[in-house]
Image (cartoon, coloured by chain):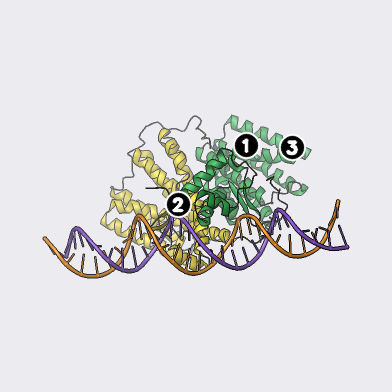
Chain colours: A green, B yellow, C orange, D purple
DNA sequence: CGGTTAAATTGGTCGGACCAATTTGCGGTG
DNA sequence: CACCGCAAATTGGTCCGACCAATTTAACCG
């Protein structure tokens, strides 16, 4: 069965993007011209470009043109990643899920953490304390992720570890993208986060599973509340200045 | 900046896919009808569907219709499927994870189930009762899956639904592969499973979240115990470090 | 030369039309 | 009654022409 015209056009555009005929940032020929040169109708060409737009390879601007994105190196985009960025309410689902997932992980970690696990956690907590005193936001964020990942590892269940690393990553992306980002800058927030992490560590260290779970719940709930506080119900910003690609 | 009609249509289609209005495998309304009902032209609707086709969520067949792919419900499975067959001990991890996941799902379902959800659950329970009386093992297995999936749906959190369908499927494969298989043939086991499912349904129906969670825990624990009784490889994994899959 | 405005360009949307593949329904046959 | 075959209806695939709004470009004037 022969491929449809849209399929062929899509592949052709892809190859143009891959072989460098159309470098990142460049503008494609006008739809009318391109369609004519490919021997297909504008509507068909349009369907093909929309496919690539959906995959983040192209970006169309009314009145201006269709441009090549630099996201050719966009990695293996799980269907979820895109959904998450376009449907903010999924962020709520994810937070709710993380609450359950990480709560259970903390509980298991309190039961199963080995000496090495505890040593690693202690090290992370110490580093976190230092970063906190130095008010090194970047370090705090990185160590935060590392700590949560370490807890998931300490649960000694590969599924927890796997989901933890993936979801946390996606969720951070989602947060950053929605211009929220915890105000770790604010002293009180940063202090609260530190306290929560420390309490969590204490519960795991003293092998108090239920307490660990409860404290993880509290931690996630706190984060949820912080994010909810600055949820702009309407349309996400957008308006800002966009870099004009060099034609 | 208002979103384009294509953007809006794309989001709307995504929503329908996520909330289960259009289940995997189902056929979408004809383009002409759907476009009319959305108040957009066929061409625009077509661009939106092409975007989803590009992302593998939809699949169009000329002369037949546009169908919902099972990509959303199959994305995670593949990487794990192989891993699971190579490292049988991961089955334990999965059961442990399911305990947490489904326990939380049951709890949420007891809180959030709509009338339709409850009707669906009741129908499944009834069917399960009939299959039980008829001692139709195949039907019981299928309905078991459907029931667990329905509970996850009733939790109204897309992540739970997603993971649930994936894990349950994988787990059944895993069980079948290790020729263990719950002895639903044994009267006592089948009876116990039925009782557990019915109790679970009662807890959800009466909107008792914590009770629902506890009963789901008990159910999974029972299943775990049954499987442990006939562990194939004989070696209880427990010790040693688990492999942490790389994403 | 700079700034304002009008014209040309470009993507976005619409409606209608025709084709080919598929599905459906009907009628007849065994 | 079951089965088969054929025609009609349905459906996605493609094309055309038109108009709109945002953007860019060019002309024009002070």
Chain under callout 2? B
Would you name the residue on which mark 1 appears? Answer: A205
Query: Label 2's element?
Result: helix
Q: Which mark is residue B244?
A: none
Q: Is residue A227 left or right of residue B143?
A: right
Residue B51 location (% of width, % of height):
52, 53
Chain under callout 3? A
Residue B172 location (% of width, % of height):
38, 44
* Residue B140 or residue B156, whichever sits in front: B156
Q: Is residue B95 left or right of residue A190?
A: left
Q: Is residue A22 left or right of residue B120?
A: right
* Residue A83 or residue C6, whichever sits in front: C6
Would you name the residue on which mark 2 appears? Answer: B216
Dots 1 and 2 on the same chain? no
Would you name the residue on which mark 3 appears? Answer: A131
Which-is-in-front pick, marks 3 and 2? 3
* Residue B169 or residue D27, whichever sits in front: D27
């Amino acid at each position: 069965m022969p491929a449809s015209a849209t399929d062929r056009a899509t592949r052709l555009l892809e190859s143009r993007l891959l072989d460098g005929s159309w470098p990142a940032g460049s503008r494609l020929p006008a739809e009318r011209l391109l369609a004519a040169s490919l021997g297909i109708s504008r509507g068909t060409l349009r369907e093909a470009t929309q496919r690539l737009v959906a995959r983040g390879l192209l970006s169309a601007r009314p009145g201006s043109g269709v441009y090549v994105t630099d996201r050719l190196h966009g990695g293996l985009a799980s269907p979820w990643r895109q959904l998450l960025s376009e449907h903010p309410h999924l962020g709520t689902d994810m937070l709710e899920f993380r609450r359950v997932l990480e709560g259970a992980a903390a509980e298991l970690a309190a039961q199963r953490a080995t000496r090495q696990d505890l040593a690693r956690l202690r090290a992370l907590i110490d580093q976190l304390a230092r970063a906190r005193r130095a008010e090194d936001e970047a370090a705090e964020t990185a160590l935060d992720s590392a700590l949560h990942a370490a807890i998931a590892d300490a649960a000694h269940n590969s599924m927890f570890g796997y989901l933890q690393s993936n979801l946390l990553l996606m969720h951070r992306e989602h947060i950053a993208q929605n211009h929220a980002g915890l105000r770790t800058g604010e002293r009180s927030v940063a202090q609260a986060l530190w306290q929560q992490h420390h309490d969590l560590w204490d519960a795991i260290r003293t092998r108090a599973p239920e307490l660990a779970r409860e404290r993880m719940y509290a931690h996630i709930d706190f984060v949820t509340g912080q994010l909810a506080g600055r949820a702009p119900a309407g349309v996400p910003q957008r308006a800002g200045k966009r870099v004009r690609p060099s034609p």
